[in-house]
Image (spheres, helix red, strand yellow):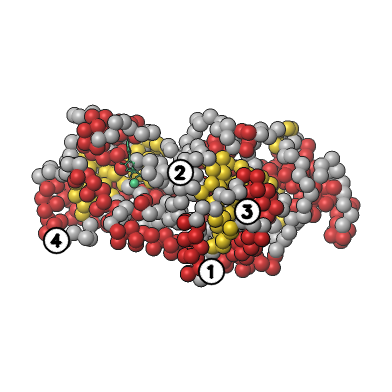
């Protein structure tokens, strides 16, 4: 049997393996099962193509897109590998030829659409072949949590039952926890090894700061580091996109808006300017970004929280494609968490889906409030553990001091309790500080035992404490109850003084009053669904384009 490296050198013409390819390949050659999570472009194909040539028999590769298959087959054929694709683009005669070649053992790799693979006819054909391995590419298609669910992928679980001795490898670039677990469960890959690698973007500097006056904070960031650069500023709502774009323009920046509410021709023109010109700042909702492959985007700024760590990673990943230093900068506050919580609560999704979305939001909050290296936290979320602190993120550069905040936590939690778990940060802080506001008087909260017990901190510092208590799961935000704090089960031992709570000490910021925009809530929510829809439409357009040009979608998609 030829060694993997020999095949890599002689057949594919590459001098060496990248990242974890060598490990994955030797695991597959030895007959193991594997789930491989690597970003687009990392080189997942070789992880099954090389074992296909090392092992006896034919490798059967499941792939969701015809364009993708054709492209791979063409490339392999050019290298002298005996490969073919069976899908609806094949005529009956062509298919018959391929099936004959399969029986005769004349093919090394066969690409096949999932719906074809699970037909009784094809399965009995496979019974007559010697199979080297099954590869399930774009395996996130099996997950309902993914963005690309394909019901046909669900049936692939039968491969293991029908061919228990044949090793299987599932590959995807979508790697967050719930999706990964779902893939492993649905494909019955529980005993297989999981390989995760390559998600680090070392040239991106991550920075997350507490939101006070977001626009001013953004302006200071741009003035200090990005005059004359091109970048993207993400906002949650269209109104805010327009407002921020106008404001940046007033400040002398070449800023353009982008959201689903704009006319198609305006969107196209703005996108064109962004791609072509050097120093355009695109202020956008999540609708913007699909298919944007501009190498010299120097910064991505978030004025609002994205909905998950995955979105954060994807959106910030649009910076620094050229490998040169780039910034990922974000300002966030508790209002964002409440707002996103509301979107989740009021969406049409099932309860399970909502629970997962909330978990994803919590993970993002964990990144915001961490006292550890941001890159480490991010990579660990994608399953890449063991990376050293990066030395380049805000926390590595300016380590946050943490201190025993148990007493402060108890004060905050009991104040939430005493005020009936019915209020948000503003009122709870007023009570802690002993402010005799109209609201405090109306509810008689100046008579509480917790009234004025928090005078040692400023309001902004209490905000930071409350954010951290939410991120740590001691407090939740009740989105149906106007964003009121609720105590969770886990805060009992804290209140009883049984466990210690470490808090980070944020630098004391200038005081600023957070605005509330209750009246705009409904509109924003509707818009968000709409902007997501646009994103999906653009995505579908890109897919169609890829198909029409006969190139794999990763050439066009990110
Ligand atoms: P993925 O499926 O992970 O998105 P591909 O398998 O399509 O990535 O590979 C992306 C590119 O990287 C391809 O052009 C491929 O030939 C190249 N590549 C992969 N592995 C290696 C390697 N070990 N050496 C050189 N080039 C590689
Ligand atoms: Mg691929
Ligand atoms: Zn770091």
Q: In the picture, which quadrant includes the N terminus?
A: top left
Instruction: Please tell me whether residue 319 is drawn above or below residue 236 in the rendered image.
Output: above
Q: Earlier in the sequence, mark 3 or mark 1?
A: 1
Q: Residue at x 31, y 42 (%)?
A: 45
Q: CA distance from mark 2 to mark 3?
A: 24 Å
Instruction: Please tell me whether residue 131 is drawn above or below residue 262 in the rendered image.
Output: above
Q: CA distance from mark 3 to mark 1?
A: 20 Å
Q: Earlier in the sequence, mark 4 or mark 3?
A: 4
**Quarter holding ligand 1:** top left
Q: Is residue 498 left or right of residue 53?
A: right
SS category of the residue bearing label 3: loop
The quadrant holding residue 46 is top left
Q: Earlier in the sequence, mark 2 or mark 4?
A: 4
Q: Give whichever of 288, 248 is nearer the camera.
A: 248
Q: Is residue 133 left or right of residue 391?
A: left
Which mark, by number, is residue 262?
1
Residue hosting label 2: 322
Instruction: Please tell me whether residue 378 is drawn above or below residue 520 in the rendered image.
Output: above
Indicate the position of residue 288 as horizontal and vertical percent values: 50, 58
Residue hosting label 4: 92
Disc 1: residue Cβ within 8 A of ligand 1's nearest atom:
no
Asked if the residues shown at circle 2 and circle 4 are in contact, with their CB atoms under 8 angstroms apart, the answer is: no
Q: CA distance from mark 4 to mark 1?
A: 47 Å
Asked if the residues shown at circle 1 and circle 2 are in contact, with their CB atoms under 8 angstroms apart, the answer is: no
Q: CA distance from mark 4 to mark 3?
A: 55 Å
Which mark, by number, is residue 430?
none
């Amino acid at each position: 049997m030829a060694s993997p490296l020999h095949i890599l050198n002689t057949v594919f013409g590459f001098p060496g393996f990248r990242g974890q390819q060598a490990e994955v390949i030797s695991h597959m050659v030895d007959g193991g099962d594997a789930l491989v999570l690597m970003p687009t472009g990392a080189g997942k194909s070789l992880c099954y193509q090389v074992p296909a040539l090392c092992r006896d028999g034919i490798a059967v590769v499941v792939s969701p897109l015809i364009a993708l298959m054709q492209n791979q087959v063409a490339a392999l054929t050019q290298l002298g590998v005996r490969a073919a694709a069976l899908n609806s683009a094949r005529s009956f005669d062509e298919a018959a030829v391929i099936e004959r070649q399969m029986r005769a053992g004349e093919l090394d790799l066969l690409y096949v659409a999932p719906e074809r693979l699970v037909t009784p006819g094809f399965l009995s054909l496979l019974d007559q072949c010697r199979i080297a391995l099954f590869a399930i590419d774009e395996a996130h298609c099996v997950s309902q949590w993914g963005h690309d669910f394909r019901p046909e992928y669900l049936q692939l679980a039968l491969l293991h039952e029908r061919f228990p001795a044949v090793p299987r490898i599932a590959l995807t670039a979508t790697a967050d926890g719930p999706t990964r677990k779902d893939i492993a469960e649905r494909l019955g890959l529980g005993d297989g090894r999981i390989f995760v690698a390559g998600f680090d973007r070392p040239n991106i500097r991550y920075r997350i700061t507490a939101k006070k006056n977001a626009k001013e904070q953004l302006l200071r960031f741009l003035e200090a580091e990005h005059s004359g650069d091109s970048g993207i500023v993400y906002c949650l709502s269209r109104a805010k996109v327009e407002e921020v774009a106008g404001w940046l323009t007033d400040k002398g920046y070449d800023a353009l808006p982008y959201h689903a509410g704009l006319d198609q021709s305006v969107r196209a023109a703005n996108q064109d300017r962004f791609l072509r010109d050097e120093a355009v700042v695109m202020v956008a909702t999540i609708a913007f970004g699909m298919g944007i492959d501009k190498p010299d985007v120097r910064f991505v700024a978030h004025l609002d929280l994205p909905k998950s760590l995955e979105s954060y990673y994807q959106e910030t990943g649009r910076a620094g494609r050229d490998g040169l230093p780039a910034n990922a900068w974000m300002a966030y506050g508790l209002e964002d968490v409440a707002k996103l919580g509301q979107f989740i609560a009021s969406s049409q999704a099932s309860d399970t889906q909502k629970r997962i979305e909330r978990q994803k939001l919590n993970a993002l909050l964990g990144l915001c409030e961490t006292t550890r290296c941001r890159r480490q936290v991010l990579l660990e979320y994608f399953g890449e553990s063991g990376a050293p602190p990066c030395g380049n993120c805000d926390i590595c550069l300016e380590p946050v001091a943490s201190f025993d905040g148990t007493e402060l936590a108890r004060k905050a939690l009991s104040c939430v309790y005493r005020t009936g778990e019915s209020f948000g940060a503003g009122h709870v802080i007023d009570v802690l500080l002993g402010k005799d506001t109209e609201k405090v008087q109306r509810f008689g909260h100046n008579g509480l035992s917790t009234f004025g017990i928090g005078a040692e901190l400023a309001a902004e510092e209490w905000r930071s404490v409350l954010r951290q208590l939410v991120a740590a799961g001691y407090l939740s935000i009740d989105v149906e109850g106007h964003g009121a704090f609720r105590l969770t089960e886990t805060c009992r031992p804290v209140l009883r003084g049984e466990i210690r709570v470490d808090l980070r000490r944020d630098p004391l910021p200038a005081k600023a009053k957070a605005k509330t925009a209750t009246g705009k809530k409904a509109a924003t929510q509707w818009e968000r669904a709409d902007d997501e829809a646009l994103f999906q439409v653009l995505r579908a357009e890109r897919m169609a384009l890829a198909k029409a040009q006969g190139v794999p979608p990763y050439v066009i998609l990110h």
